[in-house]
Amino acid sequence: MRILVTGAKGQLGSDLIRELTGRGDDAVGVDVEEMDITDAEAVARVLQEVHPDAVIHCAAWTAVDAAEEPENRETVRRVNAVGTENIARVCRELDCKMMYISTDYVFSGEGSQPWEPDCRNYAPLNVYGQTKLEGELAVSGLLNRYFIVRIAWVFGLNGGNFIKTMLRLGQTHESLRVVKDQIGTPTYTKDLARLLADMIVTDRYGYYHATNEGGYISWADFAAEIFRQAGMSTKVVPVTTAEYGMSKAKRPFNSRLDKHKLTENGFVPLPDWRDALTRYLKELENGKA
């Protein structure tokens, strides 16, 4: 199967290329140098040349706080919304399936009930969430053969993430303040890549939620487990979002994602997040990041 992956140099895109290639698929990875997704003509040209059976769209503006800066907002929208629409339009012309990687940030983050994959009570709190929602609506509005997969709290080998930040700060701080009232579940890109590769070869289209298993936790819980597994003595001081302050963008308090549709449709869920963390730390230790 020929699959074009956008954002191929990112945390998820790079793992996805490795996973697909390992399965014998013809994986074509593109990043901004090969295809500027905000340029409709460039998107049409590249996709028509590659003529993929499917596109997995991982590329996005993900710097949540920077997205709030007035000078960045139009660029964020062009990447997350217009860029996604550009890809969806060409997928329709080529009659190829599309998978769009989205986020829990399309929801309000209120309450404590897990968000259902087919819930349409959208209420993004920030520019990032709003533009990712606009990308979702473009895909669902233009295509019939699509997957929209929402993820949260992502970590992988390429680029920065919460785990790398905690490990770095833990080297120079005896204690760290970490928020306790934002609840969700981490997602390891290596595990996610396996799931997405399983999904893309099927016709079980629709909306899905995908994070690692192991229950819902706070960022403070996650940080404590990171330090425990890493053998570090750094103490985690749980604080509320209000006490922590500093963020330009509002964050959702409730990032719980209901993943029942995965098993209902025959897909194997991701492993426990603690197991994922163990494997990830070993990869970091082995110098693969």
Image (cartoon, helix red, strand yellow):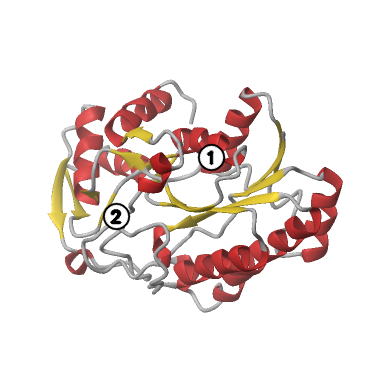
Q: Which x, y percent locates residue 242?
A: 19, 69
Q: Is residue 250 above or below residue 90?
A: below
Of the numbered discs in the image, which one, if any, rests on residue 101? none
Relative horizontal placement of residue 221, taking residue 92 as reference (left or right): left
Secondary element under disc 2, as helix, strand or loop, is: loop
Q: Residues within 10 Å of mark 1 (few under 14, many from 20)?
A: many
Residue drawn at x 45%, y 36% is: 266
Q: Residue furthest top?
A: 286
> In the displayed structure, would residue 29 be above or below residue 137?
above
State how far apart marks 2 and 1 are (Cα). 20 Å
| Position of residue 243 in the picture relative to residue 19 (left or right) | left
Identify residue type, mark 1: Leu
- The residue located at (42%, 69%) in the rendering is 120
Camera-nearest residue between 135 and 167: 135
> In which quadrant is the N terminus drawn?
top right
Q: Position of residue 252 (x, y in %)?
A: 31, 65
Say whether disc 2 or disc 1 marks the residue closer to the N-terminus.
1
Residue type, mark 2 in image:
Arg
> In the drawing, what numbered circle is on residue 256?
2
Q: Position of residue 210 (x, y in %)?
A: 41, 46
Residue 96 to residue 126: above or below: above
Q: Residue 285 falls in which quadrant of the image?
A: top left
Determine which of the numbered discs, if any, sits on residue 196 in the image: 1
Q: Residue at x 41, y 28 (%)?
A: 284
Residue 70 horizontal side relative to residue 116, left or right: right
**Count of marks, rendered view:** 2
Q: Is residue 121 above or below residue 227?
A: below
- Callout 2 environment at 10 Å: few (<14), some (14 to 19), or many (20+)? many
Q: Nearer the viewer, residue 205 or 225?
A: 205
